[in-house]
Image: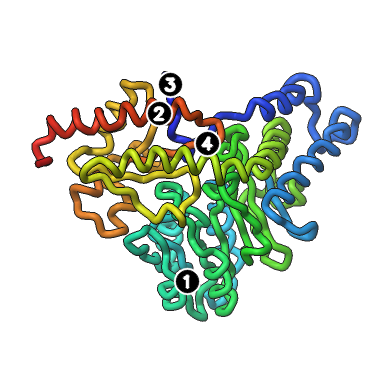
């Protein structure tokens, strides 16, 4: 049996989405910016896809939703856009983010620091969550932007974004949230959360890879990263990838439609797997399960390096990860375990297991049979485990 438990890295394309995209490769292939019928016939279909995206994240008609290449592009657009539109033009020179953001946020902040921007990295507590008091202490009058993810990509811990947005607003700062790991798992409403900017990525909710989006609230500065055309209302140059946009729109609609299944059935399967893991001696899971998205487990297995566990599981056709796929070639200790204060040995023992609505009971049962035996086998050959 092949079991895919790495859905926080990417998801399979929903067959309904794949079928909806099919005509736009070789039949309806015009450029939507063209004035002839080959282009014009695509426009109502793209408007429908945008409507699906707006509805899926609770955007108002007057807001902007920009379709682009991926969430990393969206995150870069926000960070660099704030730098060029606000920081370089005014007296604000400070950004607040968390110490456990996606690499595209952390790397962008590091780049901005090289340009002289001051960045505060919020710590997380032992549950892997940002505490509101630390946000209040960090945000100041010269803060231009607060950027905190909605749900962590490794632990699944949900952050109090609505409350963080309110703190940012009180100080006159903009608020951005990376909602990549929240959409399709828990309800997401950009307006209700008070977000000025919100990032999402299609391939995390059963759309294709290579397409994502950026929400911009009406009244927030309009941010641009790519220049050279009037695509997306002039907010993102480059011809729209029609098949992928169509696919992401439908995938968003299906993600919202299946939220109840995600919150109940996917959570039940995840809890079943998690219960089997924590029944093993010296295995613990990061984060209170009631405060995590329903599909994610970040487990630390004392005495077993994460990479060794991945190798063993892969031999048994189980796909998992040690953390963010965007940093999977980096064999340094897991940044989440380091951030919550785990000792050096434990920080190298992380294994992330993430389900989707396509995960079956039989697959979870297989994983429950394989993983404990893999842990036992690896511990037997580990000199550091007693």
> Residue 1: horizontal and vertical position, in percent?
42, 18
The reply, left or right, for residue 189 in relation to residue 154 is right
Q: Which mark is residue 365?
A: 2
Quarter residue 317 falls in: top left
Q: Is residue 287 above or below residue 34?
A: below
The reply, left or right, for residue 125 in relation to residue 193 is left
The residue drawn where x is 32% and y is 61% is 126
Q: Residues within 10 Å of mark 2 (few under 14, many from 20)?
A: some
> Residue 346: horizontal and vertical position, in percent?
22, 48
SS class, disc 1: strand
SS class, disc 2: helix
Q: Identify the mark nearer the N-term, 2 or 1.
A: 1
The residue drawn where x is 47% and y is 38% is 269
Of residues 269 and 221, the one drawn nearer to the viewer in this rendering: 269
Q: Identify the mark nearer the N-term, 1 or 3.
A: 3
Instruction: State the CA–CA distance, disc 1 to disc 3.
Output: 47 Å
Q: Residues within 10 Å of mark 1 (few under 14, many from 20)?
A: many
Q: Which mark is residue 179?
A: none
Q: Which residue is mark 1?
A: 94
Q: Which residue is mark 4?
A: 356
Q: Which residue is mark 3?
A: 2
Instruction: State the CA–CA distance, disc 1 to disc 4.
Output: 38 Å
**Foreground disc of the pair 2, 3:** 2
Instruction: State the CA–CA distance, disc 4 to disc 2.
Output: 15 Å
Asked whether disc 1 touches disc 4, contact meaning CB atoms under 8 Å apart, the reply is no
SS class, disc 4: loop
Instruction: State the CA–CA distance, disc 4 to disc 3.
Output: 15 Å
The reply, left or right, for residue 277 in relation to residue 361 is left
Instruction: State the CA–CA distance, disc 2 to disc 1.
Output: 49 Å
């Amino acid at each position: 049996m092949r079991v895919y438990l790495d859905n926080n890295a990417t998801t399979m394309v929903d067959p309904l989405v794949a079928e909806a995209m099919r005509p736009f490769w070789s039949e309806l292939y015009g450029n939507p910016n063209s004035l002839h019928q080959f282009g014009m016939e695509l426009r109502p279909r793209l408007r429908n896809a945008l409507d699906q995206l707006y509805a899926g994240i609770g955007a108002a008609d007057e807001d902007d939703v920009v379709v682009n290449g991926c969430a990393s592009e969206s995150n870069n657009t926000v960070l660099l856009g704030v730098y060029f539109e606000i920081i370089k033009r005014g007296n604000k020179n400070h950004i607040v983010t968390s110490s456990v953001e996606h690499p595209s946020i952390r790397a962008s902040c590091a780049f901005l620091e090289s340009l002289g921007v001051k960045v505060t990295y919020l710590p997380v507590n032992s549950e892997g969550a940002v505490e509101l008091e630390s946000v209040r202490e960090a945000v100041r009058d010269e803060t231009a932007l607060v950027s905190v993810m909605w749900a962590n990509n490794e632990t699944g811990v949900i952050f109090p974004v609505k409350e963080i947005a309110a703190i940012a607003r009180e100080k006159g700062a903009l608020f951005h949230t990376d909602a990549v790991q929240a959409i399709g798992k828990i309800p997401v409403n950009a307006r209700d959360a008070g977000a000025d900017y919100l990032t999402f990525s299609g391939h995390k909710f059963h759309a294709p890879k290579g397409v994502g989006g950026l929400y911009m609230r009406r009244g927030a500065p309009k941010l641009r990263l790519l220049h050279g055309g009037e695509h997306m209302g002039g907010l993102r140059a480059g011809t729209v990838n029609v098949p992928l946009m169509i696919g992401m729109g439908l995938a968003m609609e299906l993600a919202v439609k299946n939220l109840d299944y995600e919150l109940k059935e996917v959570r039940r399967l995840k809890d079943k797997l998690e219960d089997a893991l924590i029944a093993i001696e010296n295995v613990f899971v990061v984060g209170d399960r009631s405060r995590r998205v329903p599909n994610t487990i970040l487990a630390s297995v004392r005495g077993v390096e994460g990479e060794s566990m991945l190798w063993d599981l892969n031999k048994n056709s189980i796909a998992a990860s040690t953390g963010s796929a965007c940093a999977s070639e980096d064999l340094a200790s897991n940044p989440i375990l380091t951030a919550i204060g785990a000792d050096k040995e434990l920080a190298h023992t992380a294994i992330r297991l993430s389900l989707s609505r396509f995960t079956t009971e039989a697959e979870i049962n297989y994983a429950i049979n394989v993983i404990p035996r893999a842990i036992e086998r690896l511990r037997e050959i580990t000199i550091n485990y007693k």
